[in-house]
Amino acid sequence: MGRSYEVVSAAEFTGTEGLGRWGVEGPQAVVTFRTGDFATGLRLVNEIGRLAEEADHHPDLILRYPDVEVRLGTHDTGTLTTADVDLALAITAVADELGVGG
């Protein structure tokens, strides 16, 4: 596919500054943002969708009242990679802008 990324370990992922609220389950990074209401959750999902399209890297999302669960992993490798780190940082920044915690 021509993408350039490197595999990262679970410890490297969670040790990245700004990703402390994320956890790792198997080959995926996971976080739940407490949005408090459905409308805020929908705004977060829309922003994550925009970021994912820009990065051409797509997480699994579960929108429910009162939170949004995000699961990231690189499908091509079956591992976590720098692409996941980059997208997780961008998602966390958007969540912080919306005032939702992980």
Image: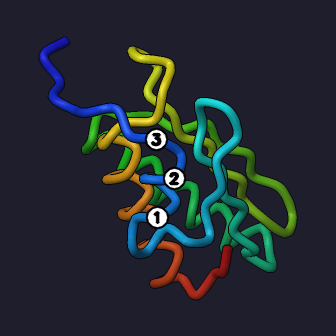
Residue behind mark 2: 11
x 80%, y 79%: residue? 36
Question: What percent of the width, then of the height, locates residue 19?
Answer: 49, 67
In the image, taking residue 59 as reference, residue 23 lies left or right, namely right
Number of on-image labels: 3
Asked where in the image residue 101 lies, by quadrant, the reply is bottom right
Residue 90 image label:
none
Question: What percent of the width, then of the height, locates residue 13?
Answer: 46, 53
Disc 3 residue type (three-letter): Ser
Residue behind mark 3: 9
Q: How crowded is mark 3: few (under 14 residues within 10 Å), some or many (20 or more)?
A: some
Q: In which quarter of the image is the N terminus?
A: top left
- Reply above or below: 98 against 28: below
Asked where in the image residue 31 lies, by quadrant, the reply is bottom right
x 39%, y 15%: residue? 76
Residue 15 image label:
1
Question: What percent of the width, then of the height, locates residue 47?
Answer: 45, 60
What is the CA distance from the residue labelled 3 to the residue labelled 1? Answer: 10 Å
x 78%, y 67%: residue? 38
- Reply above or below: 89 against 71: below
Disc 2 residue type (three-letter): Ala
Question: What percent of the width, then of the height, locates residue 64?
Answer: 83, 55
x 39%, y 74%: residue? 17
Asked where in the image residue 74 lies, by quadrant, the reply is top left
What is the CA distance from the residue labelled 3 to the residue labelled 2? Answer: 5 Å
- Reply above or below: 62 against 98: above
Q: Do the residues labelled 3 and 2 touch (CB within 8 Å)?
A: yes
Disc 1 residue type (three-letter): Gly
Q: Are marks 1 and 2 in contact (CB under 8 Å)?
A: yes
In the image, taking residue 78 as reference, residue 83 lies left or right, namely left
